[in-house]
Amino acid sequence: MAHVLIVEDDPTSRHALTELVKLNGFTAASAGSIREARIQVGRQQPDVALIDLKLPDGSGMELLEEFEDLASTQVVLITGYASVETAVAAMRQGAADYLIKPVDMQRLEAILERVSKTGSPRVEIGRLKEELQAHGRFGRLVGRSPAMLRAYEQIARVAPTEATVFITGESGTGKEVVAHTVHDLSLRRTQPFLAINCGAISPNLIESEMFGHERGSFTGAERLHRGYFEQAHGGTLFLDEISEMPLELQVRLLRVLETRTLMRIGTAVPIEVDVRIIAATNRDPRIAVEAGRLRPDLYHRLNVFPLVIPPLRQREGDVALLARSFVAELNTDRGGHSELSSESLATLESHNWPGNVRELRNYIHRLAILGRLDAKDPEPFEPMPASEGQPGSPAIVLPVGTSLAAADRQLIMTTLDHCGGDKRRAADMLGICVKTLYNRLKEYGGGPSRRSQEVSQ
């Protein structure tokens, strides 16, 4: 049976929390100060510690630092409205969650339920660190370069918490895999993980897809539809390319994050949702804010724990590990026994991989189709040259003071023209998906040209 420690100096609140914890099937111990809490921990290490930030003999942050050494204890801070920023900072330091006074008992019950069903993810993190040393893997992620080791430490710190994570990194670096790893190492790991590309959903459908709709709420709504938030209830919702979400939808998203409730289209009845949000973008989100494409209040709400994923060119030694991993996957799927030669690995490592891990994976798969995985001659492994920075490519000169939105538009239109209207090639050069490019062109008016439509077909 899981054990909970309540550290609260107010006797009435302490008694109410203790009774609730016991009603949910936990054993409970209580303390009114830091000194008493240390005595209780000495008697029995808790699975969960509910700690008030303001205590008679100090701050609950002191206990948080001490609990960092107890791998199996989840810390939930209790705070007043004036201390929310402190609580968010504490989540960055390892607190699993925070509760605002007066405590929302339903939210506390949801936290306790996740603990009782999954136990502490810190034990699994310890196992993964051992696997990392032995095989160069950290859950779904492969690599042990210094840059990735730093990323793993950040993932291990934030995954067991309820903090919102904002992942940034170039296209193809594996942001969705990172998000899934965070989910796998969280208390929500037995619940759904849902990945959504905000730039790939039609602007006309995204509100319905995100928040759902009632039957008959608009033409074509023939049945009730539960949106992504309801589908991911209890689990994690990964919002990729968050800056591509329409601004009016960003307002609704912010409201859902703050109230933990939503309303389907066609009803005024609020629905409670319990979802952890992980957002991502392949561009600097601050530029998106300056360009008016991402609301600053939403950005700050999402950016509780920023996580930067390094490009493959900065991951020394990881290309070989990744390549061998992809070949092993292919061998498992096809029942083969292929291995990469040392010459082939040397050729792969000499390339800077502008498309990052995605490009490397696709290249290995292409070699498998061609039957060249076992080739000794490194020539077949020579990757395609990077599309950016090629001699003869047109340059864009912008006057000082040009708005970021105007610069973004000119870059897109010039790149599309350089690619002869080929939207797929232009999207690859720009590091965005084709759907995102299509949506941008619609924003600029008139949609893509007839020539670009013909080339992309």
Image: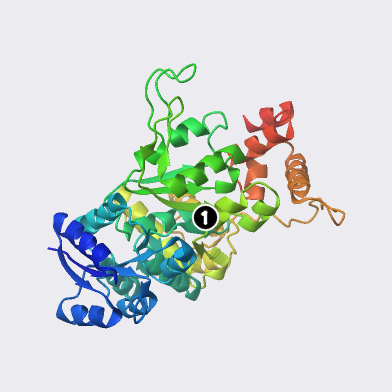
**426 versus 128 height, above or below:** above
Furthest-right residue in this view: 399
Tell me: 122 left or right of 25: right
Q: Where is residue 454 in the image (x, y as percent from the top left)?
A: 68, 27
Determine the residue positioned at 63% across, 36% down: 439
Along the line of sight, the residue nearer the viewer: 124 or 258: 258
Along the line of sight, the residue nearer the viewer: 79 or 215: 79
Determine the residue positioned at 50% across, 72% down: 147
Determine if residue 314 is in view. Answer: yes
Determine the residue positioned at 45% across, 20% down: 217
**35 versus 382 height, above or below:** below
Query: Which residue bears the numbered disc 1?
Result: 301
Tell me: 160 left or right of 443: left
Q: Position of residue 128 (x, y in %)?
A: 31, 69
Circle 1 sits in a helix, a strand or a loop, which is it?
Answer: helix
Residue type pointed to by label 1: Arg
Quadrant in the rendering for residue 21: bottom left
Check the picture and name the quadrant holding the N terminus.
Answer: bottom left
Along the line of sight, the residue nearer the viewer: 349 or 130: 130
Q: Position of residue 343 (x, y in %)?
A: 49, 68
Check the picture and name the quadrant holding the C terminus.
Answer: top right
**115 versus 7 height, above or below:** above
